[in-house]
Image (cartoon, rainbow, N blue to C red):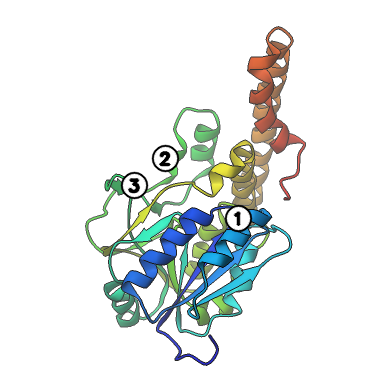
Amino acid sequence: MENQKIPDITFIIVNYNTYKYTIVAIESILRYHQDSEIIVIDNNSPAEDYKLLKSELNDYRIKIIQNKKNDGFAKANNIAMRNVRSQYVLLLNPDCELNMPLDELLNFAKENSGIGLISCKLLNSNGTHQPSIYKRNSLIEQFSILSGITPLASSQDFTDYSSPRKVYALRGAALLIKKKIFDEVGGFDTDFFMYGEEIDLAIRLLKNRMTNWYFPGTTITHHQNKSGEQFSDKTFSYRRKSMLILFKKHHSSISYYSLKYFQFLLFSLKYISIKICALFNSSEYSNKAKKYELVLFGKNDE
């Protein structure tokens, strides 16, 4: 691949036991960008998954990197980015499919200086619109989400998806960024194993006087959580720990410690109540306790 012409864009896909989805994603890329460069970084998938992946991706345009350990989504992307030769990079989830060329998205990025991250309109598997813009969450909103008063989706911005606009942060399913900018801000923070790293990156770009944009002229289908669902028992823990990291980095100390101790108290009470109920019906309640155990006592390292 080193002897080939440097393309306008490189696609990075992190694979973890998502062989079938990764193949579909790559097929969609090559359908519209035959001269692109694709880097697939495998996060220590089971041997059979990796073997199938390698056998299907015998193409000079595709570089496969195998990590010996799963250190998370953020670190994998940082490793892959070291191998990028193009000016622009699209960080693409393995459960995504391109529906059209990315020419309009790329042109918009090139014609507007000061852009940090930019993403397009995301579609669900059935073709309906998938919200992908995040707003800044206050401490009160986090209390409300944790308490179950408002859903997790309340952290999203539902105001306007009809036209290009500047945004606070974007969902990480399909993010376009200049390699130079990604490197200048230090890439993803590897304290995030899964979830939250794209919001952190967006905030750091804003602090560096750059802008993040939503561009609806291009669409990509996102078959949600096909990689994350493998960690179904741990997803809750990843999300909560990532939110604490975000608050520690980008909110006041008072807000961070308030969220941390409120979360600990709330989850401790829920855990204790579940364990008491399990004394009378262990089969029903033992699994419910697991997600709180991971947040309160466990480590998510793979």
Tell me the CA gap for discs 3 and 2: 22 Å
Mark nearer the viewer, 3 or 1: 1
Q: Could you say where residue 65 lies in the image, as x and y percent from the top left?
A: 63, 71
Disc 3 packing (10 Å; few <14; some 14–19; many ≥20):
some
Query: Which dot marks residue 125?
Result: 3
Q: Which residue type carries mark 2?
A: Ser
Q: Position of residue 207 (x, y in %)?
A: 51, 69
Whether residue 64 sits left or right of residue 133 in the image: it is right
Q: Quadrant of residue 2?
A: bottom right
Q: Position of residue 105 (x, y in %)?
A: 31, 72
Q: Is residue 94 visible?
A: no
Determine crowd level at label 1: few under 14, some 14-19, many 20+ residues with C-alpha closer than 10 A. some
Name the outermost residue toward the top: 280
Badge 2 marks a residue whose secondary structure is: helix
The residue that appears at 72% across and 17% down in the rendered structure is 275
Residue neighbourhood size for the residue with mark 2, other residues' Cα within 10 Å, grouped as few (<14), some (14–19), many (≥20) = some
Q: Secondary structure at mark 3?
A: loop
Which amino acid is tagged 3? Ser
Mark number, residue 135: none
Above or below for 214 versus 239: below
Label 1 secondary element? helix
Sequence-first disc among 3 and 2:
3
Left or right of 294? Residue 150 is left
Residue behind mark 2: 154
Q: Earlier in the sequence, mark 2 or mark 1?
A: 1
Q: Nearer the viewer, residue 301 or 42?
A: 42
Q: Residue furthest front?
A: 55
State if disc 2 and disc 3 touch (CB < 8 Å).
Answer: no
Q: Residue at label 1?
A: 49
Sooner in the amino-acid sequence: mark 3 or mark 1: 1
